């Protein structure tokens, strides 16, 4: 998997310092007061830096290796070689030569694994059942000390890399990035193609790629350029005993990190303006300002200070003014890729059609806001607030998943002092006004690359990028060409006010954590479920309120109007609620099959204030005509863009819309979106709460009295004139016997394939059998169709359960095989897999069942995970809150006979199946779905 900076995301990258790999004394990193794990930093004799994490309560073990080598190290004549090496290290070692052995071991012991290649780093990681950590580490270490690079696998895996490249040919993120590369200084490695293809990785006369691959490994991979993080339930001493003998075997070749001294842009290239033609309906404006590396300032974060002001979304902020003027929908600011010599400060905006037409006004207003920050924005009060919020966040830091934790820490350990590796993201050590000014000095029109991506066609003679065929244009830019921003907009700009949502009361409520929610008796709606929960040691709570309405459920028009109503509510809330999000009080307003859900999560101190404001917006939404038009156009764009998604994604979406009750097709929703008017939405908003089925969950650091107070507020604000009725949950259509086949015409060179095999009922026993089968079949299917047959980069066989209806889903996207060839390969696999199942013994089955159970019963690491599980139980009407335990019991009872019977009677013969395939030349045909319209639903 290749990693790069996406123009579609908030770029908030930490500023880290690079340390030489010296023999450092044993160090204990500074940790959060809310962190019970134990840590030990050490350096092996071969220069490998190691961070050990002991958590006696852990149900998972995990490890990650970060190598300070990435796509920036690719030879000019072998672009994509670092990424290719990432793939090859999984495919056999001296001790474990079988290419799929590592993956099979991880999967069969309840784990997962992956890797990614970035510009300066390659990051490998896995998690696994806690008791299986040591044998997993034995396999993992071998990948770095004794890989085989087997010749026939080298040839095969080239096709996997090429398939990964092919699968993203129509991805606008990749296409935009290729245009950026085209204008970079060709002396800088960022200008090169990082993914790799059959062309760049081809064998050449007297230059076989395997020799280049092995040579690259020998000349770039070295223990002194690696950082390892290992997490487990074992003691620190035992973890160290696991690590030392295995990872000391990695050779220290005494290499130095690559020095990227060439400037990213040729001298004199900036300022410049670049236009990029998108395939999807997106309108993106980026301002990028190169500056010197900020790695040594990770403890003070001067770029973070400036980004906080530019990216603020409160009243008077740049985004707030642009949004009110109908010019932009979103904005993010932050630091871009840092190569150790230079970095960039990036401002990225999603524009409206009006904003794209008036991009010069948007740019001018942006520089006006930057000028305002230069003049009035460097204040210690802003720093004090940032530091206060960072300190609170670190004090009550919640656990992350082990696999995410080890991967991120392994990369951070490359760039920060070992003692800071845990606290680095939260550090705001000193108030450094001169450093803030230095950042702002670089944010000028004369130092800017301004990039605009829209679907607007560029001239036929516009250049196209080499690898993604992306039309682009670049020209010099003169700041004098910018018009002055309208004075009325400039006058609206203002710097952030003090944040009123910073929590002040961190007390934990009295009483023990409850086993599960209980229904409280209150007057009127909504029904409220309450559970006090203090197990994570943070003064936080989650409150959900679902507003189920027949207006949403009954038609595609209702779904569209609900979505537009949610957009209006969020528009009205954004400026008010953004400071709450900065203060650790998050919120969401989202639509679903039955209506709208409101969620507020975070520090409980001022949670009620934010929830009350959200409920008032729902009760009395101010639906602005300009924002309605913008939101409707955006919804239409989003729906059209779904038709331009990857083939396998479109196939999966077709499955869901065909089977789930109330999941209307893209075409149905497009027709509705094109037809609805402002008056339609205003009338819909007035009627939305007239007939409603509401339910609330209050969970966390809350008293029963506080939960009842929230219920009373909801009743008074939302339901005083409502008729309370039941809005039933959706079901899934029951497939008839045999196979239904659907063809989709998709403009993409790859073929998409999705095969859905449905179970008989929602009984726990049936769900258990399908869960175990999905676990057993997943890794062998991937090994056969992806690794051996090289049908494509995207290959999976997994559970495809929808609304508790069990199923298996087989997903493939292939750059070379037709739908018929893929289907034949799947059939051949299913036929041959019968023997594999028949050869399973009881020990094999118990191992696979335990792997399923370890995922199902995974340890809760934060309050939100428990809240979400409770909320799903409420949605299902399972008020004993023990569905997980019932399913676990059924899984434990699955026998070999159960597995074989289900496979032979349902899976291999495709007893109840739906197959969706795509192709650019394929004639669209979904006539088979007519048989489903009268099919009964499974609930």
Image: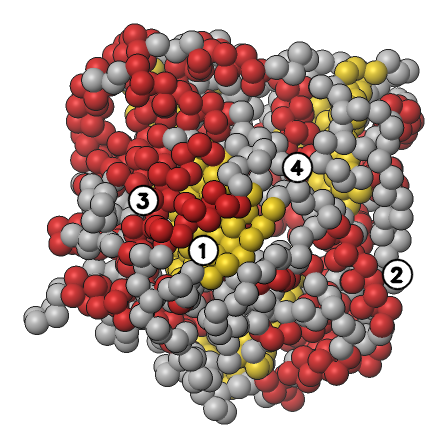
Could you tell me if the residues under marks 3 and 4 are in contact, i.e. CB atoms within 8 Å? no
User: Residue at 71% across / 19% down in the picture?
Assistant: 516
Quote the CA–CA distance across marks 3 and 4: 31 Å
Q: Mark 4 points at which residue?
A: 862
Quickly name the residue at label 2. 498
**How far separated are the C-alphas under marks 3 and 2?**
53 Å
Indicate the position of residue 95 as horizontal and vertical percent values. 22, 45
Residue 612: give x, y in percent of width and height.
87, 37
- The mark lying in front, picked from 4 and 1, is 1
* Residue 570 x %, y %: 74, 45
Kindly identify which residue carries mark 3: 139
Name the residue rendered at 33%, 67% in the picture: 252
Q: Can residue 386 be seen in this view?
A: yes
Q: Residues within 10 Å of mark 1 (few under 14, many from 20)?
A: many
Residue 279 x/y as whole percent:
43, 57
Residue bearing mark 1: 228
Residue at the extreme bottom of the image, as rendered: 268
Give whichever of discs 2 and 4 has the lower sequence position: 2
Q: Nearer the viewer, mark 3 or mark 2?
A: 3
Please rate how many residues cluster around mark 2, counting C-alpha atoms within 10 Å: few if below 14, some from 14 to 19, many from 20. few
- Whether 275 is drawn above or below 267: the answer is above
């Amino acid at each position: 998997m290749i990693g790069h900076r996406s123009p579609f995301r908030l770029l908030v990258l930490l500023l880290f310092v690079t340390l030489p790999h010296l023999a450092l004394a044993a160090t204990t990193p500074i940790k959060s007061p809310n962190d019970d794990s134990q840590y030990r930093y050490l350096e092996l004799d071969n220069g490998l830096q190691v961070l050990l994490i002991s958590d006696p309560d852990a149900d998972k073990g995990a490890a990650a290796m970060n190598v300070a080598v990435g796509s920036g190290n690719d030879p000019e004549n072998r672009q994509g070689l670092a990424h290719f090496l990432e793939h090859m290290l999984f495919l056999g070692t001296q001790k474990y030569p079988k290419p799929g052995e590592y993956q099979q071991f991880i999967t069969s012991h309840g784990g997962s694994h992956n890797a990614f290649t970035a510009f300066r780093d390659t990051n490998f990681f896995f998690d696994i059942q806690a008791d299986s950590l040591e044998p997993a580490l034995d396999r993992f270490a071998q990948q770095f000390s004794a890989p085989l690079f087997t010749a026939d696998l080298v040839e095969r895996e080239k096709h996997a890399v090429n398939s990964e490249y092919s699968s993203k040919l129509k991805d606008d993120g990749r296409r935009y990035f290729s245009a950026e590369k085209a204008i970079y200084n060709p002396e800088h490695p960022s200008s090169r193609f990082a993914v790799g293809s059959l062309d760049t990785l081809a064998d050449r006369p007297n230059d076989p790629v395997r020799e280049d691959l092995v040579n690259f490994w020998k000349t770039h991979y070295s223990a002194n350029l690696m950082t390892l993080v290992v997490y487990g339930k074992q003691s620190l001493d035992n973890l160290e005993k696991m690590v030392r003998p295995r990872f000391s075997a990695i050779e220290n070749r005494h290499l130095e990190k690559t020095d990227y001294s060439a400037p990213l842009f040729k001298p004199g290239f900036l300022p410049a303006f670049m236009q990029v033609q998108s395939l999807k309906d997106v309108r993106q404006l980026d301002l990028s300002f190169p500056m010197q590396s900020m790695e040594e300032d990770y403890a003070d974060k001067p770029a973070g200070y400036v980004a906080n002001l530019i990216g603020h979304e409160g009243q008077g902020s740049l985004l707030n003014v642009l949004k009110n003027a109908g010019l932009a929908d979103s904005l993010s600011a932050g630091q871009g890729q840092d190569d150790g010599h230079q970095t960039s400060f990036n401002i990225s905006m999603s524009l409206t059609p009006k904003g794209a037409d008036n991009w010069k006004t948007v740019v001018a207003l942006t520089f006006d806001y930057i000028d305002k920050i230069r003049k009035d924005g460097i204040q210690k009060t802003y720093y004090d607030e940032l530091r206060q919020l960072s300190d609170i966040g670190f004090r009550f830091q919640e656990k992350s998943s082990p696999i995410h934790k080890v991967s991120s820490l392994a990369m951070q350990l490359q760039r920060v002092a070992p003692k800071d590796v845990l606290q680095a993201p939260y550090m705001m050590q000193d108030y450094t006004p001169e450093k803030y000014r230095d950042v702002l000095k670089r944010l000028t029109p004369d130092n800017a690359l301004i990039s605009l991506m829209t679907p607007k066609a560029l001239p036929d003679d516009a250049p196209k990028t080499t690898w993604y065929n992306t039309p682009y244009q670049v020209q010099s830019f003169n700041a004098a060409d910018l018009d002055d921003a309208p004075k009325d907009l400039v006058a609206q700009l203002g710097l952030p006010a003090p944040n009123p949502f910073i929590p002040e009361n961190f007390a934990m409520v009295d009483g023990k954590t409850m086993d599960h929610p209980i229904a409280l008796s209150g007057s009127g709606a909504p029904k409220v479920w309450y559970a006090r929960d203090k197990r994570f040691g943070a003064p936080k709570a989650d409150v959900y309120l679902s507003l189920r309405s027949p207006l949403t459920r009954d038609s595609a028009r209702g779904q569209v109007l609900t979505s537009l109503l949610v957009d209006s509510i969020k528009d009205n809330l954004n400026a008010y609620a953004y400071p709450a999000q900065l203060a650790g009080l998050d919120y969401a307003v989202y639509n679903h099959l039955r209506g709208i859900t409101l969620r507020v999560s975070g520090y409980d101190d001022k949670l009620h204030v934010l929830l009350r404001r959200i409920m008032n917006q729902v009760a009395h939404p101010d639906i602005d005509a300009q924002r309605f038009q913008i939101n409707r156009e955006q919804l239409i764009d989003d729906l059209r863009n779904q038709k331009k998604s990857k083939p396998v994604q479109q196939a999966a979406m077709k499955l869901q819309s065909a089977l789930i009750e109330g999941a209307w097709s893209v075409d149905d929703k497009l027709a509705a979106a094109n037809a609805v008017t402002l008056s339609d939405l205003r009338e819909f908003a007035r009627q939305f709460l007239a007939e409603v089925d509401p339910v609330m969950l209050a969970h966390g650091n809350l008293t029963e009295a506080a939960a009842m107070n929230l219920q009373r507020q909801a009743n008074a604000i939302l339901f005083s004139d409502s008729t309370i009725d039941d809005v039933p949950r959706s079901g899934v259509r029951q497939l008839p016997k045999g196979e239904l086949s659907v063809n989709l015409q998709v403009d993409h060179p790859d073929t998409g394939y999705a095969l859905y095999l449905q179970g008989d009922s929602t009984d726990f026993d049936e769900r258990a059998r399908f869960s175990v089968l999905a676990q057993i079949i997943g890794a062998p299917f991937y090994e056969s169709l992806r690794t051996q047959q090289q049908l494509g980069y995207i290959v999976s066989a997994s559970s495809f359960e929808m609304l508790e209806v069990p199923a298996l889903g087989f997903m493939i996207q292939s750059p070379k095989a037709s739908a018929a060839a893929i289907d034949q390969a799947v059939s051949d696999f299913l036929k041959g897999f019968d023997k594999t199942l028949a050869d399973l013994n009881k020990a094999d089955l118990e191992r696979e069942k335990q792997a399923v159970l370890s995922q199902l019963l995974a340890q809760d690491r934060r309050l939100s995970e428990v809240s979400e599980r409770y909320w799903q139980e409420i949605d299902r009407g399972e008020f004993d809150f023990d569905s997980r335990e019932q399913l676990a019991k059924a899984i434990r009872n699955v026998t070999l006979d159960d597995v074989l019977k289900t496979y032979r009677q349902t899976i291999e013969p495709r007893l109840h199946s739906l197959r969706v395939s795509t192709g650019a030349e394929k004639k669209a045909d979904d006539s088979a779905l007519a048989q489903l319209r009268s099919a009964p639903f499974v609930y």
